Amino acid sequence: MPQAALIVIDVQNDYFPTGAYPLHDTQAVLERTVRAVRSAQAQGLPVVLVQHVAKGSSPFFNADTEGVQIHPLLRAAAPDAPVVVKGHADSFLNTTLHATLAALGVDSLWLCGMMTHNCVTHTALSPQAQGYTVCVLEDLCTTVDPMIHAIAISALRDRVEVLSAQRLLAA
C-alpha cells in the first residue's frame, strides 16, 4: 500500500517578521501547516521536518542562532518528527532525507514550506525525488512575495502534482 509523508521544508524563525529575512504571509502559512501536520498525524502519516543550516557566514540560518531554529509552533505540533538538516536548496542533497523516508516506507512526498521558488522547488525536482510520487501543497508554501510564489507554482505544475492541502489532507 502506498505510504505518503508530509515533508515540511525550512519553516524557520528567520523567515518570520522578527527574523533576518521575513517572507510573505508566513504566519498564515504556518497556521495552515500546523493544521496539515495534525491532519497527517491523525491519518497515521509520517511528518518529516527539514531545517536549513547555512554553511559558513550567511545573512540568515546561521548555526547556533535563534533564526535557524524551526518555528516553535511547528516543533510543538510535531515534537517527535525526524529533523533532516540540509545545507543546500535540495533537501535530498548530502542529507539523510532519502534514508529517513526509506526507513518510514514512504513512496509519496507531500511537500510544503519556505521558499517556494527555491528549496521547495529544488526538492520537488531533485534527481533523488524521481523515485517518489511528488505533490507540492501550494497553500502551505510561501516566498518573498505572492507573484514569485505564483510563478514557482506555475512552473512546478509542468513537472509534479500541485494541490491544495485542504483537498489532499481534508485539513
Image (tube, rainbow, N blue to C red):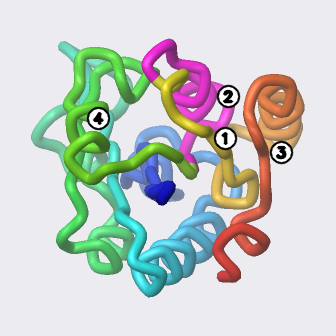
The type of residue carrying mark 4 is Leu
* Magenta stretch: includes residue 69: no
Give the residues in magenta: 111-128
Q: Is residue 41 left or right of residue 135?
A: left
Name the disc covering residue 97, or none: 4
Alpha-carbon distance for marks 4 and 1?
A: 22 Å
Residue for point 50% across, 13% down: 127
Q: Position of residue 65 (x, y in %)?
A: 18, 44
Farthest-out residue, front: 1
Q: Earlier in the sequence, mark 2 or mark 3?
A: 2
Name the disc covering residue 117, or none: 2
Alpha-carbon distance for marks 1 and 2?
A: 7 Å
The type of residue carrying mark 3 is Pro
Q: Earlier in the sequence, mark 4 or mark 1?
A: 4
Closer mark to the observer between disc 1 and disc 2: 2
Query: Mark 3: which secondary structure?
Result: helix
Residue for point 44% across, 51% down: 7
Q: Is residue 115 left or right of residue 50?
A: right
Q: Label 4 crowding class (10 Å Cα cut-off): few <14, some 14-19, many 20+?
A: many
Q: Position of residue 10 (x, y in %)?
A: 42, 44
Q: Label 3 crowding class (10 Å Cα cut-off): few <14, some 14-19, many 20+?
A: few
Residue occupied by mark 1: 143
Name the disc covering residue 146, or none: 3
